[in-house]
Image (tube, rainbow, N blue to C red):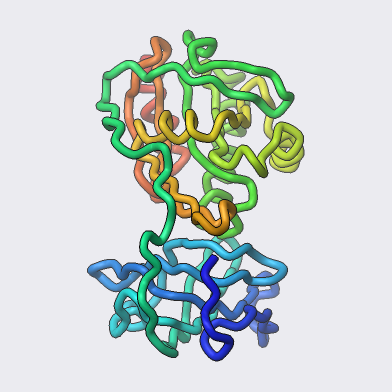
Amino acid sequence: MRTFSASYLGLALLISACGGSPDRREYTLQGQILTVAPDHKEANIKHEEIPGFMAAMTMPYKALDAKEFEPLAPGDLINATLVVVSNDAYLQNVKKVGNAPLEQPAAAPSASSGFELLKDGEPVPNARFLDQDGTAIDLASLKGKAVVVTFIYTSCPLPTFCPLMDRHFATMQARLKEKNNDLNVQLLSVSFDPVTDTPAVLKKHAAGLKADPRIWTFVTGDRDELDQWASRFGVSVSRSMNDPKDITHNLRTAVIDRQGNLVRSYTGNEWTPEQVLADVRVMVGVD
């Protein structure tokens, strides 16, 4: 990741939380504004490493108060407090400390560029994966099952991003087990970071979540092939040319029917496990 002058972007330091919830953590975040949402409630920020918490990366961050981002523009250098509490994360005390030209291009485009989005009802192209046990599988082998797929990487630290997808899938697994998976659903978490997320890493991650491979499987594969396949669902992945671990991505989750056709895609992190399972029940005709 690009390094700015020390007066602007020194190493991020952990701030001890003063009182409040015992699970509340605060960190200093120092970086550069890339974009600000029209409602000023979210900004895409390229930031330095936060030691002990997360690598240097580019991520969208929300603010509880839109006034935090209101005066900011692309190129502004900022200091802010990143608050991580329970299953949420947000910025506060955002201060502009300078401005610098935006790096052009900010990130290398992924191989996903130029592929047409799948429409509801269209057949989903086959894809080849390597699962958490190192076994080669493909999407076609799951025909006959309803598949719920999401896209993550295991080192994503923000609780409102990939970890939230994990929690939602864990909830769906629990609900499915309550009825012996009467819907015949396969949950599929696809990592788009195959360099880090080897089968051994995925296996450990899955074990930590108590993922039952009969219902919930973690997979990865060839990076370019995965990027192309994920792009058909609307997943956008960019990696910094200087640091491939600096990953920018959005969130997409999709339901695929038993014949391998797209039923529905869910954008972002606002969907719920109950909503997805209800849609699956309608699809398979189970009340």
Position of residue 141 in the picture relative to residue 255 (left or right): right
Instruction: Give the x, y percent position of residue 227.
Output: 45, 35
Q: Is residue 24 above or below residue 77?
A: above
Instruction: Give the x, y percent position of residue 22.
Output: 70, 74
- In which quadrant of the rendered image does the C terminus lie? top left
- Residue at 47%, 68% in the rendered image: 46
Position of residue 127 in the picture relative to residue 279 (left or right): right
Q: How many marks?
A: 0
Q: Which of the 4 image quarters holds residue 16?
A: bottom right
Foreground residue among 129 and 142: 129
Position of residue 185 in the picture relative to residue 155 (left or right): left
Q: Which of the 4 image quarters holds residue 189?
A: top right
- Residue at 49%, 51% in the rendered image: 239
Whether residue 159 can be seen here: no
- In which quadrant of the rendered image does the N terminus lie? bottom right
Q: Is residue 247 above or below residue 22?
A: above
- Residue at 65%, 25% in the rendered image: 131
Instruction: Give the x, y percent position of residue 256.
Output: 40, 22
Q: Is residue 240 above or below residue 25?
A: above
Position of residue 14 in the picture relative to residue 168 (left or right): right
Whether residue 91 can be seen here: yes
Q: Which of the 4 image quarters holds residue 42?
A: bottom left
Foreground residue among 47 and 83: 47
Instruction: Give the x, y percent position of residue 252.
Output: 40, 41
- Residue at 63%, 78% in the rendered image: 12
